[in-house]
Amino acid sequence: MSTLIPCIIAGGSGTRLWPVSREAMPKPFMRLPDGQSLLQKTFLRAVGLPGVDRLLTVTNREVYFRTVDDYRQLNKGNARLDFILEPFGRNTAPAVAAAALHVSQLYGDDAQLLVLPADHLITNVEEFSRAVTAAQKLATEGWMVTFGIVPTAAETGFGYIEKGPALDADACQVARFVEKPDAVTAQGYMDGGLHFWNAGMFCMRADAVLQELRTHAPDVLNAVSSCLASSPRKEGNRELQVELDSESFALTPDISIDYALMERSEKVAVVPCQLGWSDIGSWQAVRELSPVDAQGNYCNGEAVLHDVSNCYIDSPKRLVGAIGLDNLIIIDTPDALLIADGRRSQDVKVIAQELKSSRARAMMPTVCTAPSRVRGAPTRCSKKASVSRSSALWFARRHHSHCRCTITAASTGSWSAAWPPSPTASVNSCLIPTSRRSSNRGSRTGWSIRASSTW
């Protein structure tokens, strides 16, 4: 069987999980009650598959260092890591096209791509591995294979896959993809047994998906191909990066892989499976994963409760006192507090959308990530970290684009300066190149960065 390369698609802020999930701290980095992030769980599932020794991740370049930090904590098998870094999101079709081109060029046309969303949860890992093996067999024959989750409820928040004729004992041809249904239709799907939840996971040969893109979405393929041709590639110790060119990437169509390809192709199969799957699409979904006390309450952090039941309270930094409450979700972060009726957790997106349009800063947390080579990354803004001058320049640019703060950069020599000296100052005029001669190490510069919030 040909090489299998898992491709984790890590994008989107998850507006229903505000204030923890935001643009600068997207949903994949959200920690579950067991302490691991959704991204880490996806990573472990991927590298745990038989024969996998390389992982490809398509993500935003702003969260690259945080992604590497999450991986390195768990990469005990020393899997090689490839990254395609997007300057901004353009939906899943360009991401999958870039991944297929990358894999085809570097690892062969017959290499298989296993596309996995970074922010979904799967509890039955053994069944996941079985389903992937079944999908690989069909992918070898040129099928683009999706995974259909056997529904456990009449969900109206998911898209569905309708199965067609059987291809083998484990898979069927896809008859059609169905948009999110109303409650009555969803119940009919549940009772009929012909429909599965669409989990957005795919297994396919690189050459097969590229051929289907040429047929059904040539605009996507051509734009992404041109973008990759003008994008720099960097290779280091068991790691490869491709940072997509911003100008050419802006010309790629903003469209999902479902709309661009899967709904148009006649060569799509589905492997039905029961994975213990959840898209963690709301605080209610998170609550269902959390252990509760005798009154049905979950508390992360210190809390004093009186006559309180069925509440989810996440406040790791601040004491919470509550009286006479039932079925509330309370999420406390350093700069934002959410209080919601547990029955309306899907409506949290309304707050996030309003804040995004009127108060962009509220969509950015007061936490930043320093480069992965910095000791202790990720760090809070008030923490100090030693970095090289070039890293300091990168960090200052990236950090100050998201966080209104004062950064002090001090060299290990005799020079020091504040950054920025004024709100309109240029970062290049503040991080002045200096060097210090050392008799045994040559010319080099050491820097430290201290950032303190002034919100």
Image: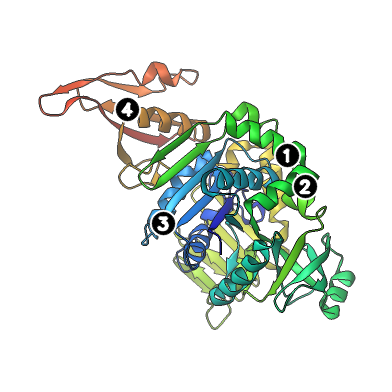
Mark toward the start of the polypeptide (1 vs 3): 3
> What amino acid is found at the position of numbered circle 1 in the picture?
Val
Q: Position of residue 124 (x, y in %)?
A: 57, 76
The reply to whether residue 325 is visible in this rendering is no
Q: CA distance from mark 3 to mark 2?
A: 31 Å
* Disc 3 residue crowd, few under 14, some 14–19, many 20+, Cα 10 Å: some
Q: CA distance from mark 1 to mark 4?
A: 38 Å
Residue at image coords 44%, 36%: 234
Residue at image coords 34%, 34%: 450
Marks 1 and 3 in Cβ contact (< 8 Å): no
Mark toward the start of the polypeptide (3 vs 2): 3
Q: CA distance from mark 4 to mark 2?
A: 43 Å
Is residue 233 shown left or right of residue 144? left
| Residue carrying label 3 | 79
> What amino acid is found at the position of numbered circle 3 in the picture?
Ala
Label 4, secondary structure: give it: helix
Q: Which mark is residue 140?
A: none
Label 1, secondary structure: give it: helix
Q: Quadrant of the N terminus?
A: bottom right
Q: CA distance from mark 4 to mark 3?
A: 30 Å
> What amino acid is found at the position of numbered circle 4 in the picture?
Arg
Q: Which of the two marks, 1 or 4, is nearer to us in this view?
A: 1
Marks 1 and 2 in Cβ contact (< 8 Å): yes
| Residue carrying label 2 | 260
| Residue carrying label 1 | 220
